[in-house]
Image (cartoon, rainbow, N blue to C red):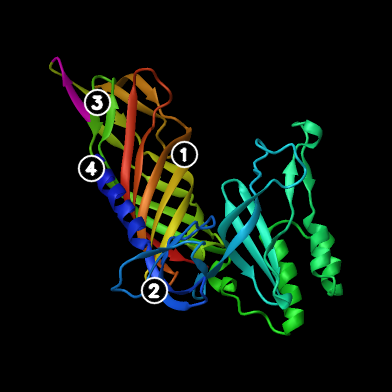
């Protein structure tokens, strides 16, 4: 089973690496030349410092940075522009806030993600412990400027947190000619969704149509899936230690059933998801006959089954619009014992002379990793490996551990 786990981890790493691919896009150099290129999609969560591209499938890879590239993007997904100017790098982490109210600007050249476009553009810069927004008035062909927002410790008191919300007054100036938008500004939060709503509303009122922005793709919306997932568990030998020596129950195969709730997150083309899958697994009963001093002793356990309540994350790798691979990892938050079994018994000729209590519940005692394939967001198959867990109550001596691999079929209800 350890070899199976190692092979699975290598396969897991291979799938993640294989998913990084080149997609159709473009770039504009500082000279204004636009080139159709293939851009390496690495699913940036933070703003990229550079990107890899090539002219076509047979060309060598090249690296583009904000000093040489004015703009780049992948079609129907995202767009980045080069920005040179002040950025407030003050930490947003409440453990490392500044004592100064005013932004602590540093000049830098970076890529900004364009999140709304039209008469007025909204941009995003995301780095370690900071998120900053910028704007540009394209109608006046103005430069990109930062929107002021900063959390800080007021008067040197790190027991209090204050906020410089200068962006509110800045928005009032930016949209001074839009009475409808002005009404919403006091309630606008310094978040992408709140700011974007303001800019999109204004741009729609100016153009009369919804802007054709690549970041408005349907692939970047939160989705919910609920699936029924029956399967088979292949149990390894159950090692039993310090209970009349060291023994093991034979390996077994039995059924499992689960219901998986999946929240697909609204970024990186919906390639990441949060999972919660309550499962019921049946192990069955077992018995070992152990000879000692010309006598036969038995170690036995009644019917044993359990319910797992794991949470985890999943990463999708798209092959096309209908097919995708996935890999996931789950932490088993709670395991509940079910079935008749309460103890593991040691007996001679039917007379029990020693018992070990089975644990009725366990917290955070194991995890699982899996890889699989989904077709048409409806049908799936997964191979999963669950690490060993102790089934006996806490003991300084006796131990019984079980691990298993699973083949799971899935059907998405909705």
When the figure is inspected, residue 110 is found, relative to residue 253, above or below; the finding is below
Residue at image mark 1: 335
Q: Tell whether label 2 touches label 3 (CB within 8 Å).
A: no
Between marks 3 and 2 in the image, the one whose residue lies nearer the viewer: 2
Q: Is residue 96 left or right of residue 228?
A: right
Type of secondary structure dominating the magenta stretch: strand
Q: Nearer the viewer, residue 341 or 389?
A: 389
Q: Earlier in the sequence, mark 3 or mark 2?
A: 3
Q: CA distance from mark 3 to mark 1?
A: 27 Å
Residue sitting farthest toward the left: 294
Q: Tell whether label 2 touches label 4 (CB within 8 Å).
A: no
Give coordinates of residue 349: x percent, y percent. Answer: 24, 22
Q: CA distance from mark 1 to mark 4?
A: 25 Å
Residue sitting farthest toward the top: 293
Mark 2 burial class by Cα count in 10 Å: few <14, some 14-19, many 20+: few
Q: Earlier in the sequence, mark 1 or mark 4?
A: 4
Q: Residue at x 76, y 81 (%)?
A: 206
When the figure is inspected, residue 309 is found, relative to residue 229, above or below; the finding is above
Residue interval drawn in magenta: 288-293
Q: CA distance from mark 3 to mark 2?
A: 56 Å
Q: Residue at x 28, y 36 (%)?
A: 286
Residue at image mark 3: 298
Q: Is residue 309 visible?
A: yes
Give coordinates of residue 111: x percent, y percent. Answer: 55, 61
Residue at image mark 2: 320
Between marks 4 and 3 in the image, the one whose residue lies nearer the viewer: 4
Q: CA distance from mark 4 to mark 2?
A: 32 Å
Residue at image mark 4: 3
Q: Earlier in the sequence, mark 1 or mark 2?
A: 2
Q: Residue at x 64, y 58 (%)?
A: 85
Q: Residue at x 65, y 74 (%)?
A: 117
């Amino acid at each position: 089973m350890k070899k199976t786990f190692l092979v699975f981890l290598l396969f897991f790493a291979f799938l993640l690496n294989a998913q990084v691919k080149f997609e159709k896009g473009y770039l504009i150099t500082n000279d204004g030349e636009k080139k159709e290129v293939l851009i390496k999609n690495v699913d940036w969560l933070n703003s990229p410092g550079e990107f890899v591209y090539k002219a076509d499938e047979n060309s060598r890879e090249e690296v583009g940075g904000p000093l040489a590239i004015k703009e780049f993007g992948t079609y129907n997904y995202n767009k980045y522009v080069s920005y040179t100017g002040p950025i407030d790098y003050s930490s947003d982490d409440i453990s490392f806030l500044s004592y100064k109210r005013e932004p602590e600007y540093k000049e830098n050249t970076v890529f900004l993600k364009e999140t709304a476009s039209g008469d007025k553009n909204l941009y995003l810069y995301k780095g370690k412990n900071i998120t900053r927004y910028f704007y540009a008035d394209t109608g006046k062909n103005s430069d990109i400027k930062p929107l002021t927002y900063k959390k800080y410790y007021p008067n040197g008191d790190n027991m209090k947190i204050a906020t410089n919300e200068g962006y509110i007054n800045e928005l009032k100036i930016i949209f001074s000619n839009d009475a409808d938008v002005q009404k919403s500004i006091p309630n606008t939060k310094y978040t992408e969704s709140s700011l974007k709503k303001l800019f999109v509303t204004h741009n729609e009122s100016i153009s009369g149509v919804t802007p054709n922005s690549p970041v408005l793709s349907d692939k970047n919306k939160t989705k919910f899936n609920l699936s029924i997932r029956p399967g088979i568990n292949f149990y390894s030998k159950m090692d039993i230690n310090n209970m009349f020596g060291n023994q093991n129950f034979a390996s077994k195969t039995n059924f499992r059933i689960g219901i998986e709730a999946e929240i697909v997150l609204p970024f990186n083309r919906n390639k990441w998801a949060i999972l919660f899958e309550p499962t019921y697994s049946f192990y069955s009963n077992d018995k070992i006959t152990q000879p000692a001093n010309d006598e036969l002793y038995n170690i036995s356990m009644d019917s044993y089954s359990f319910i797992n309540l794991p949470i985890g994350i999943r990463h999708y790798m798209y092959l096309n619009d209908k097919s995708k691979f996935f890999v996931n990892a789950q932490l088993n938050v709670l395991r509940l014992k079910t079935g008749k079994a309460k103890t593991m018994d040691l007996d001679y000729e039917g007379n029990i002379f020693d018992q070990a209590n089975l644990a009725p519940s366990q917290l955070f005692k194991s995890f699982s990793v899996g890889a699989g394939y989904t077709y048409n967001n409806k049908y799936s198959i997964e191979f999963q490996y669950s690490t060993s867990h102790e089934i006996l109550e806490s003991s300084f001596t006796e131990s019984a551990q079980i691990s298993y691999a699973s083949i799971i079929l899935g059907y998405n209800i909705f």
